[in-house]
Amino acid sequence: MTNKKQILLVNDMAGHSKVGMGAMVPVLSYFGFPTFNLPTALVSNTFDYGKFNVLDTTDYIRGTLDVWHELGFSYDAVCTGCMFSEQQVKLVVDYCRELSSQGALIFVDPIMGDGGRLYNGMTLNQVALMREMVSVADLCFPNYTEATLLTGRDFRKEGLTIAEAYSMVDDIHRLGSKSVLITSSLIDGKNMVVGYNHYTDEYFALEYEEIPGLFHGTGDLFSAVLIAHLLKGEPLKESTRTAMDTIYRLLEINKDMKDRNRGILIEQFLDVLDK
């Protein structure tokens, strides 16, 4: 049965690589959600190939939102990802506020970096822009590196205590996000995702087994699975656990892939979403 909740993805669209919207649309569509897109940039391929071409779509976004207003389009949920300019963020933030006032849920993935550093092609300007995006979120889900950038804290390779992790969650909550997840964290010597659910005013920590190496698009797949289960009415902690377990299975299947820069070709593995 098709779920009628309509989702808008605001993220970059890569040509060669299965990341961003290219990774998320197949997952959300598989779960039955009508899924639409507003690209923030057209990107030739992931930046770690060393060479890339990027077309900023700020003018396209401005014109598209004007048309959508005239046509009366609306969405039940928005998930934002990569942002490339201050004007772009202002347009998207204002649109998210408008949709939120109509009852839409706003999910923010503040994509900036991993492993203690910014992604290739990203600058410190992205940090300020992402703080703006987080301010309108019902839920944001930075990884540990992105959480340190958002909060101005130092990245610590040795990890955090659980009290320090929850304190960082609180800092992000104070930026405006109602609920918060921090992924890819080393906490008390264990790999964990920590979170705060504003509906229940509860904190939680979920442990996971790490598969070594960087797989591009993993965060986008996690976001898509998480959002799908949340929009099906499942609680945040349980949806997070499901998304974590699903990503582990996908990475386990693809751990020997030679070119991780292009991302997991998710269309071949959609049956994993049912397990």
Image (spheres, rainbow, N blue to C red):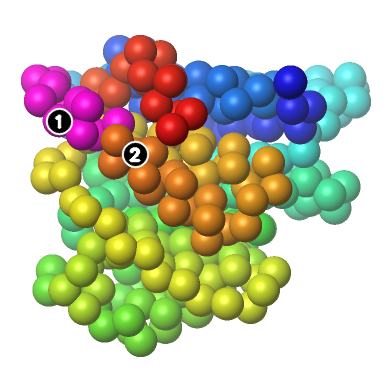
Residue 34 in view, yes or no: yes
Residue in view at x 17 percent, y 40 percent: 214
In the rendered image, residue 177, in percent from the top left (x then y), is placed at 60, 65
Q: Which mark is residue 273?
A: none
Instruction: Assess disc 1: are there few (<14), some (14-19) or many (≥20) residues with their C-alpha within 10 Å of its C-alpha.
Output: some
Q: Is residue 154 above or below residue 220?
A: below
Q: Secondary structure at mark 1?
A: loop
The quarter holding residue 263 reads top left
Q: Secondary structure at mark 2?
A: helix
Q: Residue furthest bottom?
A: 163
Please identify the quadrant where the N terminus is shown: top right
Residue that numbered label 1 is attached to = 255
- Closer to the chain start, of discs 2 and 1, is 2
In the rendered image, residue 271, in percent from the top left (x then y), is placed at 43, 20
Q: Is residue 56 above or below residue 172?
A: above
Residue in view at x 90 percent, y 26 percent: 72
Residue that numbered label 2 is attached to = 247
Q: What separation in Å lies between label 2 and label 1 (alpha carbons)?
A: 12 Å
- Whether residue 115 appears in magenta in the rendering, the answer is no
The quarter holding residue 258 reads top left
Magenta-drawn segment: 250-261
Label pair 2/1, CB-CB below 8 angstroms:
no
In the image, 134: left or right of 127? right
